[in-house]
Amino acid sequence: MGNSLKSANFLIESRLRDAARGEITAYYDLGVAYSTGTAGVQFDLIEAHKWFNLAAINGDETAQAARAEIAGDMSAREVAIAQRAARDWLGMLRARAA
């Protein structure tokens, strides 16, 4: 495994752990990683939109702007898939908290 892949995996794993605790900055960081391909993370606008959306609905104004910006590069279907993924994530967090 190359160093860039190791760092990408570490970035994603550590931020996912934080996101699982509901940390808004982790949501935003994951959005940035997927929207830019940071540290070798696979570029994925649907995944980026999902994370920016989660940060945005928790009041992060920078995430709101980023979500709007990348939505312009996505089809309506892709946005719908990303929104469903965000709802699924929230449902998983609620189920875990119950």
Image (cartoon, rainbow, N blue to C red):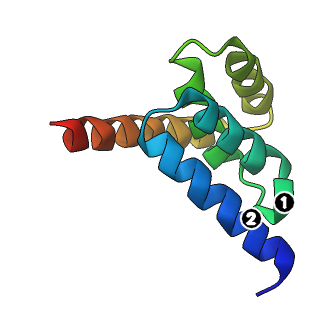
Q: Considering depth in this image, is 60 or 48 the residue closer to the camera? A: 60
Q: Amino acid at mark 2?
A: Ala
- The percent coordinates of residue 43 (x first, y second) are 78, 56
Mark 2 or 1, nearer chain start = 2
- Which residue carries the number 1 mark? 39
Q: Considering depth in this image, is 75 or 43 the residue closer to the camera? A: 43
**Quadrant of residue 28 within the rendered picture:** top right
- The percent coordinates of residue 76 (x first, y second) are 62, 34
Q: Quadrant of the N terminus?
A: bottom right
Residue drawn at x 78%, y 28% as measured from the top left: 72
- The percent coordinates of residue 8 (x first, y second) are 74, 64
Label 2: how many residues lie within 10 Å, few (<14), some (14-19) or many (20+)? some
- Which residue carries the number 2 mark? 8
Apparent side of residue 92 relative to residue 81 in the rendered image (left or right): left
Label 1: how many residues lie within 10 Å, few (<14), some (14-19) or many (20+)? some
- The percent coordinates of residue 21 (x first, y second) are 42, 39
Look at the image and tell me whether residue 14 can be seen: yes
Q: Quadrant of the C terminus?
A: top left
Label 1's element?
helix
How far apart marks 2 and 1 lie (CA) works out to 5 Å
Q: Amino acid at mark 1?
A: Ala
Q: Residue furthest left?
A: 98
Residue drawn at x 51%, y 17% as measured from the top left: 58
Whether tag 2 and tag 1 are in contact, CB under 8 A, the answer is yes
**Vertical comparison of 84 with 72: above or below:** below
